[in-house]
Image: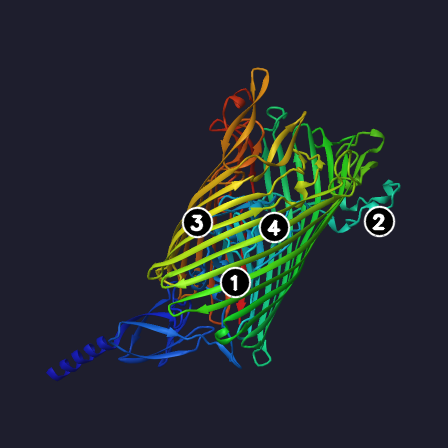
Amino acid sequence: MKSKIVLVLLSLMSAGVQAGVIKGKIKDAQTGEEIIGASVIVKEDPGKGTVTGLDGSFNLSVNRDKYTLVCSYVGYKKYEVSVAADKKEIVIPLKSDDVALDEVVVVASNPGRTEAGARGIERQAMNVVNVMSAKAIELSPDITVANVIQRMSGVTIERNSSGEGQYAILRGMDKRYNYTLVNGVKIPSPDNKNRFVPLDIFPSEMLDRLEVTKSLTANMEGDGIGGAVNLIMKDAPSERQFTVNLSTGYNAMYFDRDFQSFNHGAIVKKSPYEQMGMPESFKVTDENFTKENLRMQWKKPLPDVTASLSYGDRFLNNKLGLILAGSYLNTYRGKESEIYYQPGREANNTETRNYSDQQTRIGAHAKFDYHITSRHKLTWYNGYMDMRESEVRDRLDKKEGYVRMKWNRQYIVNSTLKGEHAFLDDKALSLTWSAVLSKAYSETPDNSEIKLLDGGNRVAVNQALIRRWEHNSDRDKAGYIDLSYKWKLPVSEIVFSAGGMYRDKKRDSFFNEYTFETVNGQPQYKGEDWNNYDEINFLYESRNISGALNYDATEKIAAGYGMAKYTFGKWELIAGVRVEHTDQGYLLKYPVGDVKAESGQKYTDVLPSFHAKYGIHKNANMRFSYARAINRPSFFEIVPYKILNEDFSEKGNPDLKHTVADNLDLRYEFFPKSSEQFMVGVFYKYLQDPIEQGLVAQGQDLYFIPMNFGDASNLGVEIDVMKYFNWFGVKANYTYTHSKITTDKRTMEGSDVIVVTQTRPLYGQAAHVANLSLLFKSTKLGWEGQIAGSYTGKRLSEVSNYLDDDIWEDGYMQLDASIEKSFKNGISIYAKASNLLDTPLLRYTHKGPHTDGITGFDRKNGNLIERKEWHGQSFMLGIRYKL
C-alpha cells in the first residue's frame, strides 16, 4: 500500500515537471526586429503550436521533459531548437532566406512591408520621415491612399464632393505645399488648373508602404514646404507569391434613399466644335447634340465591389524579378448638404444639395528588376491609375433648382527606367540614374446642368441648360542622375554626393460651353410636359468656345545639388545645397481685351539644407533639420483669366509670386522594440509670400483670386506613439499647429469702407489633429482587428477680403473599424466599416457685429452657419488569399 502511494506521488511530481509553459520571442537574427505572425510548433507533437503576437512573443504549454520547437516565417529559414522542461523563456533568431546568385543577393522581403521594417526605415533615415507599412495598410479600414494617409502623424485630408479623402495636408500646410512621388519619382497631375495629385486615384492594395517626408535633403526636389508623399508600389519578391482579394459592401446613405444615375455611356466625348475639326467659322444647331445622356434613373445602387490580384516571381537563375498587380474598385457614395447663409441669400431659404457619386478605379502596375551582376542592377516600372466618376447633383431651394450630370475620367501613366551601378573596392563609388515618361489626363465631356424654377417643377426659360466639354493633359519627360563616393577614414566615414535633374512639362487645356433655352420661351411643367430630363424641349442659344480654360502651359525645371554626409561615433551629419531654375509660361488661345496672350515667370532658387542625427542612448535618436524649400504657382494661377461660377467667380493673377520658406525640425525618437516607437518633435516654418485663395471684392463682384497676402509663420508639436503587447496594440499621434499671417481686410466705418489689418491662421490649417487606433490580435484563433478614431479640429475653409467674414470648418470626428480572420490555408476573411459616427461637416462664420443684424439663418453657439454636410457610413466584407 505504501509503495503504491509513493508511486502515485512520484508520477504526480513527474507530471508537474513535464507540464510547463514556455514563453518566447522570435526576432530577425540580423536586425533584432520582432517577427509578428511567425509559426511555432512542437516537432514531437505537430498538433500543438502557436503564432507570435504583435510584439513577436508567444506562450506555449508543453507536457514533455524535453522537446523541439520548429519556427518558421515566410522569407526566413526554418529554425529548430531543443528545449528542456525547466526552460521558461527563450529568444529565437530567424535568419533571412536571402537568395544568392553569382555574388548577387536578393533581399527576401521589402523592409517596409512589416511594422518593424517601417520603424527601421524611420530610424535609419537622415531626415524626418513617417512610414506606414503594407501590413498596417492591409488592416486599415480604408481602401484608398487618401483615406489611409489621414492615420499618419501630422496629416489631415481634404475631401471630395462624395466625402472621400482626396488631398493630403501636411502639418497644416495646404495641399499645394507638398508633392507626390511614386517609387521616389514625381508624377504629373490630372487637375485642369493645379499641380497637386489626387490621392484617391490610388488603391491602397497596390502599395508596399507609404512614406511621408517632412524635411527635405538636397537630393530631393525643393518644392515641398509641407513635405512629400512617396508611394512605394509592390516590389518583386524573392520567391513566388500570389495574392487575390475580393470584397463587397454598401453605403448606409442608400438604405432609405435612391441613387441617382444618368446614361453617361451615351455621352459624345467631343464637342460639336471638335467634331467639325475646330474651324474658324461654323454653325451649331440642335441636331449636333444628343439628349440620351440626360436620361436619369432613380434606384438602389448595386453593392460596392473591390478586387485585386498580384503575382510575383523570379526567373533566369533568380536574376530577373517580376511583380504584376491589378486592382479594381467600384463604389457608390454620396453626400447630403444644406446650404444656409450666403451673401444675398433670402432668409429662411435653405438650399439642399444631394450628391450621388459612382467611382470606378482601375490600377495596374508591372515592375521588373534585373541583376546584371552584384554591382549592376536595372529596374523598369510601369504604372497606370485610372478613375472614372459619374456624379449627379440635385441643388434645390424654394425658388429654383439645378440638376447637374457630370462624368469625369482621370488617369496617370508612368514609366521609369532606373539603373544602379557600383564601382571600386567595397562599392565605394556608386551611380544611380532614372529616365521617366509620365502623362496625366482628365476629361469631363458634356457636363450638363439644367435650371429649374418653382421648387424644381418648371424648366427655366433662359439658360435652361448649359453643356460643357473640358479636357486637359500633362506630359512629363524627366531625367535624374546621382553620383556618390564613400570615403572611409579610421574612425569615421564621409559620403560625397552630387547630381541633378531636368524636367520638361507640357500641359494643354480645352474648354467649350453651349447654352440652351426652352423652345419659344414656353413653360414646361414636370408631370405634365415631361417626367425625365431627356423629354424637355431645349433650343440651342449660344456658344462659348473661347473661354479662359483654353490654354497651353510649359514648365522647364533644371536642378543640381551637392551634399556630404559625415558619420563618426554616434553622430551623423548631412549638409548640402540645391539650386533649382524654373521657367514657367502660358499661352492663352483666345485672349480677351488687353490681356497678355503669352507670358510666364523665370526664377532661380538656392536651397541649402543641414541635418544632424545623434544616438543619445540605445535605440534612441535626436534629430535636427534645416531646409529651405519653395512653392511654385500652379499653371493656371498666373493666367489672367476670369471664370463665372455658381457660388463665387474666379480670376487669375499674373503677378503672383512663388513662395520661399525656411523650415526647422527638432525630434526625439525612441524605439523600445523594433515595431514600437515614441516620437516627440517640434517644427517651425517661416514663409515668404505664401499663396492663398482669397475672396476679393472687385467692383460689384466677389472673386476667388490666388494672392500673396503677406509673410507667415507656422510652428507646431508632433507626438507619435506605438506600443504592442502580445494580443493588444496602441497607435496614437497628436499634432498641434499654430500659424499666423497678418493681412489687409475691409470693413465699414459709418458709410465708408476702410482697410484694417487682421491676424489669422493659414488657409486649410487645423490647430489640433489626433489619431488613436486600438489593435487586437489573437494568434491562436487567427483573429485581428482595429478600431480607429480621427479628429481634425476647426480650420479656415475660405478666406474673405472683409474683416471677420472668413468661413471656418468645425472640428470633425471620424470613427472606423476593421476585423480579419485568417486560416492556415492562406485564406482570410475581413470586414471594414468607415464613418460610423456620420458626424456632419459644418461650416460657419464667427459671430460678431458684422453678423448681429443677420436674421433668419441657423446658428451654432452664436456663429452663423454656412452649410452642413453628411456622407453616410460605409460597410465592406471581403476575402483574401495569399500563396
Q: Earlier in the sequence, mark 4 or mark 2?
A: 4
Of the two numbered discs 4 and 3 on the same chain, state the one appearing first in sequence: 4
Of discs 3 and 1, which sits in the foreground?
1
Q: Position of residue 105 (x, y in %)?
A: 50, 76
Q: Is residue 244 left or right of residue 83?
A: right
Marked residue nearer the N-terminal end (3 or 1): 1
The circle on residue 665 is 3
How much space separates mark 3 and mark 1, taking CA atoms?
23 Å
Q: Secondary structure at mark 4?
A: loop
Give the vertical position of 585 relative to 424 (above or below). above
SS under mark 2: helix
- Say which quarter of the image contains residue 691: top right
Residue 275: image tag: 2
Residue occupying image coordinates x 54% and y 74%? 423
The relative height of residue 39 versus residue 875 in the rendered view (above or below) is below
Residue closer to the observer: 161 or 460:
161
Kindly identify which numbered label has been placed on residue 497: 1
Is the residue marked by circle 3 packed among few (<14), some (14-19), or many (20+) residues within 10 Å?
A: many
Q: Is residue 207 visible?
A: no
Front residue of 464/368: it is 368
